[in-house]
Each structure stands twice: as C-alpha cells, then as structure tokens.
Amino acid sequence: MSERLDTSLAEPLGVYVHWPFCLSICPYCDFNVHVFKNVDQDSWLKAYAAEIQHLGHLTDYAHPVTSVFFGGGTPSLVRPDILEGVLNEITSVWGLSPNAEITLEANPVGLDRPLLVDLKTAGITRFSMGVQSLDDAALSFLGRTHNAADAIAAFALARDVFDYASLDMIYARPDQTVDAWTAELTTALALAPDHLSAYQLTIEQGTNFGKLYQAGRLTLPEEDVQIGLYDVTQSLCHDAGLAAYEVSNHARSGHESRHNIQCWQGSPYIGIGPGAHGRVDVEGQRHASIGIKQPAAWLASASNLSVGHGLASLERLSKEEVFEERMMFGLRLVEGVSLSNITENAELPVGALDLVKINFLVSAGLLEDRQDRLVATRSGRLVLDRLVAELLLA
Ligand SMILES: C[S@@+](CC[C@H](N)C(=O)[O-])C[C@H]1O[C@@H](n2cnc3c(N)ncnc32)[C@H](O)[C@@H]1O
Ligand code: SF4
C-alpha cells in the first residue's frame, strides 16, 4: 500500500464504498444488492478510482481520511488487490490516517484462511461478518446459504486473523422466544466478538418477506415479546462486556465502530459506488450526494471519461435539514446529542429547540435532559423513530 500520512490530530473524515453484489439475495434485505455474476472487478476498480478523483476535486478537505467502510452487498467477494487499489486511490487523493479504521462487510460463505490473510494484508483492520442466526432452521428461513456450524467456523478463523472482528445478528424473528434467543445470543457472545450488531428483523416493502407479510403469511412477535427480546439483548451483551453504544450496536470499550459514530455525530463522509449516500462539504456548505442506484448504469457513467463519476444527485442541505439529521442520528447514540454542539454546527440558536416539547418528552420518561446533552431513555429508544418525529414536528 502507499505510505500513509501521520496526522494524529486529523478531523474525522469517512469514505463509504458500496459493493452491490452478493452470491444470493436474502428475502428480508432491501439494500442495493444484485446477484454476483459476470462482474469484471478490474473495471470496477477503474470506476471507483474515477469517482474518488472526482469527489477529491469537488470537496474541500485538506485532511486525511480517518475511516473507510467497504459495505454492501458482500464486499468479501471483492478481490483483495482491488480493495488495495481503492485504498491507494483514497490515499493519493486525501491521504489516509495511519490509524484509520478500515472495515469490510463479509458473508461466512467462501472465507478461508489464505483469503482472510490477503484481506488483512490489503489493509482491512475491521472485519464485520453477517452471521444473522445460530439456529439452522432460522438460517434457512432467512434464506442464508450457510448453517450455524459454517458461520461459527468462519467467525473463529476471522477472529484468529483480525485484531478486530464484529458480527451481525437478526432477532425478533417470527415465533422467536426470549429463551431461544437467550441461548442463541449466548453462543454468539462466546465467539468473543469485539463488536456485535443485533438488529430486530425489519419487514421492508418490495422484499420477499414484505410480500409474505402483506399476504398475512409472516407475522412478527407481539410488542411485549419484542421488548423482552430487546431487554435480554441489552443485558446479555452488557454482561459479556459489550455495552450498547447505539440502539443496535454493542462493543467492547474502545471498539465502537468509529466510522458509524462519525456519521451519526454529523462528521462528513464521502459516498462512492452505486446508490451510495454521502454528506460532503462543497464550498463550505454541507451537501447530500447519492450515487446512481443501478450498478450497470453507475459503472457506465463513472467509466465514461467525459463524465468520470456516477453521482445521481448532489444537493445542498439547509441548516434545518442538517440540524434534523444530527438530532435523528445523535439520539440513536447512548451518549445522546450535545445541544450546543448541534445548534452551533447548524448555526441555529439554542432557542430553535422547542423546550416545551423537550420538557414534555422528559416528563413522559422518553428523554433525559443532562445539562447540555439530550439522551433517549430505554423507553425512548424503544420508540425512537416516533420520538424523533415528535421532537422535530414544527
Ligand atoms: C451488508 S449486510 C452484512 C454482510 C453480508 N452481506 C451478509 O449478510 O452476510 C448488513 C447487515 O444488515 C442487516 N440487515 C439487512 N436487512 C435487514 C432487515 N430487513 N432486518 C434486520 N437486519 C437486516 C443484517 O444483519 C446484515 O448483516
Ligand atoms: S443480508 Fe447481506 S448477503 Fe443477504 S442480500 Fe443483504 S447484503 Fe446480501
């Protein structure tokens, strides 16, 4: 890899690189994903490099990147030399902080020790694997092509090769009991992850699960069971030394995902690839960027020398929009949001916050007002989307 700059005082700057391919598509997933077939990875590297160059010219940053997140899709299908090529391009445009966090999302299928070692050599520092469940029947229901033993073996290998290994689980599945989830999560925690994302199954419109749900052929656990599942997730993770730092994310102290925290705290991140979102500063103004969603169309646009990028839109955000986003994402964090910080960054007076509403939500036990910080309580986190909507309602 190219030499990295030594910038220990670097401001946070993230890069998200979207890889839109998976070996097969899971019935619950509505990410921008397509089946991995006839993909010319060298062309993808050229297109990523062109878009990185384009965003380098467009944005204002004179400081290096502090985190890179290869997300998907299944970026563990990307050849290590291609990942290294992308990192070299990022280094040549912005520089890469020497202790940058470089995450790769992975599927257990197709992983072996030589590949994992090559991924580490290419520069990956944080390996994040989609395990989803450790129950074979549930894995089959979730459309996964691996069983529990495969996932456990793949994670043990990753755990051995990488200093930082994370795993994803999906709970609150149909008919799941608190006892069954307790056993499953206990097994997952025994794999000694540094970080664990536990997502409640969300039914997304347009997915196979969405269709089954609409036809009444798939039902989620009742609300009281969901709350029981959430509570046991918090306590088991906490007892295993992986405290929650966000609604669905738990980590050993010091192993929180820096990339995600930066995004949730409102730091800039550059989005590369099909459908990738970014929040970037152009001429001192925060902008939202979105890549062309369709992979072939994005690839054609970014590979076209007279275009050189696959951005579908780049729009300036108003002060109110910046403020709303910071509130929405900040309240997901256990540390909450600093009011003076977000009002100052959005250049809004502190008075822009509706104190009557805040006081009402505090008295309802959904928010805590800790001097300058606004923090969602346990009850607030259970209804976070509704809480934020209420808070931001003019
Ligand atoms: C890009 S995937 C992770 C890596 C890899 N693609 C895999 O699935 O093995 C991101 C994660 O989002 C979560 N996820 C996706 N769709 C979800 C849904 N509808 N409900 C809950 N979690 C979901 C899964 O836990 C998944 O691991
Ligand atoms: S969950 Fe992961 S493997 Fe499954 S379709 Fe979504 S991105 Fe692909």
Image: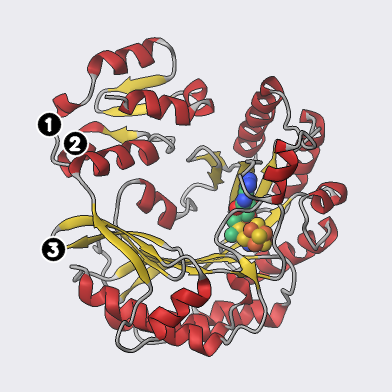
Q: Nearer the viewer, residue 214 or 149?
A: 214
Residue at left 77%, top 37%? Answer: 218
Horizontal placement of 238 versus 266: left or right? right
Q: Is residue 37 found left or right of 327 in the rendered image?
A: right
Residue contact at pointers 2 and 3, CB within 8 angstroms: no
**Residue 255, image x, y percentages:** 49, 53
Quadrant assignment for the C terminus: top left
Q: Earlier in the sequence, mark 2 or mark 3?
A: 3
- Helix, strand or loop at label 2? It is helix
| Label 3: element kind | loop
Q: Quadrant of ligand 1?
A: bottom right
Could you tell me how far apart the alpha carbons at marks 2 and 3 are, in whole angstroms?
21 Å
Question: What is the spatial separation of the Cα atoms under label 1 and label 3, in whole angstroms?
Answer: 23 Å
Which colour scheme appears in the figure?
Answer: secondary structure
| Mark 2 vs mark 1, CA separation in Å | 6 Å
Amino acid carrying label 1: it is Pro
Tell me the crowding category of disc 3: few under 14, some 14 to 19, or many 20 or more residues within 10 angstroms, Cα based.
Answer: few
Tell me if I can see residue 120 in this picture.
Answer: yes
Percent position (x, y) of residue 297?
47, 75
| Disc number placed over residue 283 in the picture, else none | 3
The kind of secondary structure element at disc 1 is: loop
**Which amino acid, mark 2?**
Thr
Name the residue type under label 3.
Glu
Report x, y in % for residue 322. 25, 44
Say which quadrant the N terminus sits in.
Answer: bottom left
Q: Is residue 4 visible?
A: no
Q: Residue at x 28, y 62 (%)?
A: 314
Query: Residue at the location (75% across, 37% down)?
Result: 215
Q: Which of marks 1 and 2 precedes in the sequence?
A: 2
Circle 2 residue? 343
Identify the disc placed on residue 306: none
For label 1, the residue is 349
